[in-house]
Image (cartoon, coloured by chain):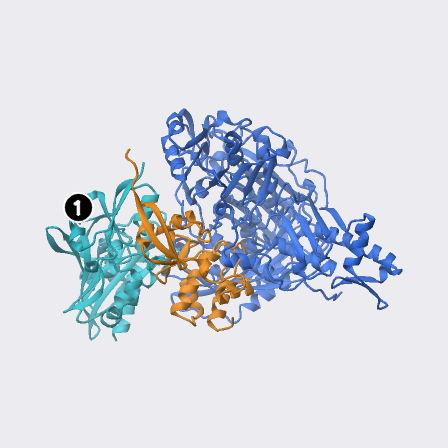
Amino acid sequence: MGEKEYYNIKLTVNGKVVTGSVRAEISLLDFLRDNNYIEVKKGCDKGDCGACTVLIDGKATVSCLTSALQAQGKNIYTLKSLGSWDKLHPLQKAFVKYEALQCGFCTPGMLMTAKALLDTNPHPARESIKEAISGNLCRCTGYRKIVDAIEAVGRGEL
Amino acid sequence: MDNFKYFKPQNFKELLNVKYDLSSAGFPLAGGSNLLIYIKEKSIRSGTLIDITSLKELRGIKKTGDTIEIGAAETISGILESKVLENELPFFSVSMRDFANPLIRNKATIGGNMADASPVADTAPPLLVLDAKVVAASKSGIREIPANEFFSGPGKNNLSKDEIIQKINIPVPERGSGIFLKLGQRKGTSISVTSVAVWIVNDSNKITGIRISLGGVAPVPIRAVNAEKAFSGKIIDENNITALAETLKEDIKPISDLRGSAEYRTAVSINLLKRAILTCLKTEE
Amino acid sequence: MTEERTYIGKRTPGLDEKDKVLGNVIYADDFTLPGMLHAKVFRATKPSAIIKKLNADRARKLPGVACVLTAGDVPNNESISNVVGQTTEVGLLEARHQVLVKNRVRYYGEAIALVAADSVAAAEEAIELIEIEYEEIPGVYNPLEAMKPESPKIHGDNNIIAQWKLRKGDVKRGFAESSVIVENTYRTPRQEHAHIEPESGVSWVDDMGVINIRIATQVIEHYRDVAAVLGIPQSMVRIKGTIIGGGFGGKEDVTAEVFLGLLTWKTRKPVKLTFSREEMGYGRQKRHPYILKYKTGASKDGKLTAMEAEIISDSGAYVYLSPWVLLYSTVHSTGPYFIPNVKVDSFSVLTNNIMTSAFRGFGGMQVAFAYEAQMDEIAKKLKMDPLELRKKNFLKKGSETANYQKITSEVLLKESVEKALSALGEKSKSTETKKTGRGFACSWQSYGRMTYLHDTSSAWVGLELDGSAVVRSGIPDLGGGQRESLRAITAEILGLNIEEVHVISTDSQVTPLAGTVTATRALFMSGNAVKLASEHVLDIITKKASEMLNTSVKELSLKNKTVYTTGGGSIPLVKVIKQCAAEGTMPQSLATYKAPFTDPVKTEVIKDPVFADFTFGAQAAEVEVDTETGIVTILKYASAQDIGRAINVNRVEGQIEGGAAQGIGFGLMEDYIEEKGIPLTLNLATYLIPTSKDIPDIQSIILESKSGKGPFGAKGIGEPAITAAAPALISAICDAIGVRIKHIPATPERVYRAVHDKN
């Protein structure tokens, strides 16, 4: 058994440069959580639930099936990039207003998918919203209130 | 103990060299949506992950002459967003709308989906009816493998150990229209139980050319040659379509698994084929 | 009474929602401590076997491994989770749970050894170094087989571990008097909770030697189980609950508490254990699959005359809560209908399948699928409108159920069905291959635990010197807004702004024990306890204020941190509090709410009240069936529930919509499949739950009879929200294709076969 190889990694998370040393097979999800980006959730670790969704160069995808080393040099955005306590992002305001969450565990991924959707389609129809979030599983809400919240932001309500 | 290495070739030549050197211990890593699962499930325990995403020879969707070339490392989202495909071959991009879900479509690549060789790979049936070619590259050169001859079994393809998929070449059909119908167990993110693609050329109601491909009904995605023969030259109506579609039984060898029994797969394949052909004929009108 | 309330019945803002949308909540797996070890569980890969050899030497020697524990290392290995709270006369309770397998493996995934190491990778590697040899022994995987005398026995000498009966009137005579009789067998799936957050926790030893376990749990009182396994005083174990990433009953039985307790007790170090998604599959309890044989009779004019049923529950390899689940099923098996003659026999049967235990609905759901299908079939035979038939038979306030329990609250079933159906609007048209259909189903579901368990909930409420209030209640927050409701109740009673009430919850060391967040009991029990305590605090304040203002208590009210007299006088609340403090009469109260108590059930025949009350409701669906593929699309959906009184409308809607969605999954797609005890649906790519594209916009309709036993007349809604979903869908499918699906989930293949077999 030889020593495992480690590789240097440098990427930008929420505008901040993060460096580290990782094994070849490490996922971006594990790398982020190991670096205390705990807002990125591990629900299934196989790309089936969407809880670990982040934006990579503007596109929403599952970080559990993304090789950390492939994120080398890229811009990663997690939920923490959206808003702050004093200045919630309109999507965050809408999720609170429309009660688009219960346990909140799918919320970090759901919000990032919604963000990516609105970035490319600012006024999405309900069906487009349902399509966009179809890779983000929610077991609490039945989705209606989530779709309501995203739709409201699309309408410019918040 | 798992032992993986990572290597990112700086150019195409280096990629071909390293694939030659590593042979079956070198795993091309593009989107990672299959490879990372195999690593996590420990069905692959060691090897080198060869990061191919940024090589320009594996990227791009363009039309050269009568051929559309799609780089192997293009994502499904890239295919859906491609203006070239939208203008020249909308059938193919429309076919990708039900591929997994948007999160996976932003990651999964056409080359990866083909190389993975799942019997229910959703890129396969549309590519098969388009007579697409898989362009395989190695140190010793480039060869074109017809999509229909690319698969050798569930999870197996006909690439040599030193080869990688460079791109997929699709000859733009002069005429005709196509459709891809996929049947899953739920509406969002479903793995196909069975899927049917058809491409039809129709002359005054008579089918003068037809290609049919199915996923999920054999060890590999297949062309349904018997059904194609049956439909060729026929004027289709409500009365003869069922009998013609039944010839599909000679083409398929479905198994029973978690997602459906062989009998069900057979029955719905026939129904989907009928629906696909009727829909195509309608759009041809 | 149209009393105007400030918070009750409104859409109150969430206590933690802002932190949830900001990503600030520290869920169980997000928590770390310096020097923390990482744990993994070594699990069986055979469903029925004897361990011939188990060798962990290589694992122990691996660098970074702190300890490897096997059965011999567990002080009390065979004990926990066997407390089923009833006399042994009503069930054979020898199926003792073992923490780690000592000798015999009874299901695939059973825990055999624990590893703690300084990294996840080292723990995983150590697991692979554990050597095991099995001798496979015959197992039994079908409950009908398991009931036969010659079948292999899972524990003891009888696989039937619980039986319950209903006996009312004379079914023979009832059927003789029937003009129609409908007889059917129904089957329901092994549903998985599939909460998105895995089971997870972190444990450590504090400076008082207490084992602390910070964990996502619905039951903080499992500290007693940890203490029992370790053989230490219960006071030496503390469970601190986290915000939970979904539970649905899946975090009701012990999850990782005992494993964590053992590892920290052995190493004296912090330890984290989080289950993988696959482990959540084979290592955790599921909903019991049922076989339900129903025979129901009715007179020509649609009065139910008799019902006979045999209910068989696949209870997996260990008892857990199976006897209770079965009792729920048995009591609820008649549906919300008055039936003069009833005979029900139900059986919990052990098999070598995955464990089955609590899941939202708790036995009420499987029977709802059967009793509602029966009602539809009777209506069909009588050529009667299905709602007309039901209206003739609905239980009413004062009716007696088949376990001789009087219904004490209002029953708004007729109104629920009518509202749900009218919410569907105009019916969509069918085409040749896309058939549309409509259906509805009614349900009743108890809220609160069985009354013979003498359930209690304690809460402490006190006022700070600045007039703000603190609530202490052990109740965990499952995401349903449990803490929020308590906050609203105290704010309402003490006339405070909701932001001035702080709730401290789910910590066995600092909060009064409030029981579990299960059985739709949290609002009912803790809501009442907090209400009692808040009212007591109000009494203390008004009594003191009456002395200070020289007026009678009756003339005082508390609002906006001021005590007002009817005559226009007032005194600031903080002054009253200061006076109370000065006199040593603290404005605080520890209250305990007691549910109605009944005697333990002593016989298998249930002939006494066992529940405090029931929630009644209805769900309605319009579907489109693709007859060429069997694919069902839900076009419209509505659920109407009489929840007594909404405390927070947002949260009630959330429960109604989420419950319907989970019930839709149960009806259409969810099934944890095992083949001879080997699980086949280990991840969320194979175990399918509904996505946003599968669930229509669910319309939630709230009815308020104000007749419940909860605070302000509230009933419970957590579980009742799920119960009628599957039968409503199946009824709609039946309307569309003319065939009733009797085996759910109604997968495309099953629906296709139903269409095809008819033709």
Q: Which residue is mark 1?
A: B161
Residue at image coords 48%, 35%: C351
Residue A57 occupies which quadrant of the picture? bottom left
Residue C619 location (% of width, % of height): 56, 60
Residue at image coords 30%, 67%: B81
Can residue C521 be seen here? The reply is no
Q: Is residue C598 left or right of residue C671?
A: right
Q: Amino acid at mark 1?
A: Lys
Can residue C264 be seen here? The reply is yes
- In the rendered image, the quadrant that contains the N terminus of chain C is bottom right
Q: Is residue B25 left or right of residue A40?
A: left
Residue A38 location (% of width, % of height): 46, 51
Q: Is residue C715 left or right of residue B235?
A: right
Residue C362 location (% of width, % of height): 57, 46
Q: Is residue C511 left or right of residue C698?
A: right
C378 or B178, which is in the foreground? B178
B119 or C517, which is in the foreground? C517
Chain letter, orange: A
Q: Colour of chain B?
A: cyan
Chain letter, blue: C
Residue B20 location (% of width, % of height): 15, 46
> Are there few (<14), some (14-19), or many (20+) residues within 10 Å of tag 1?
some
B273 or C659, which is in the foreground? C659
| Extreme residue toward the right, this view | C550
Callout 1: SS: loop
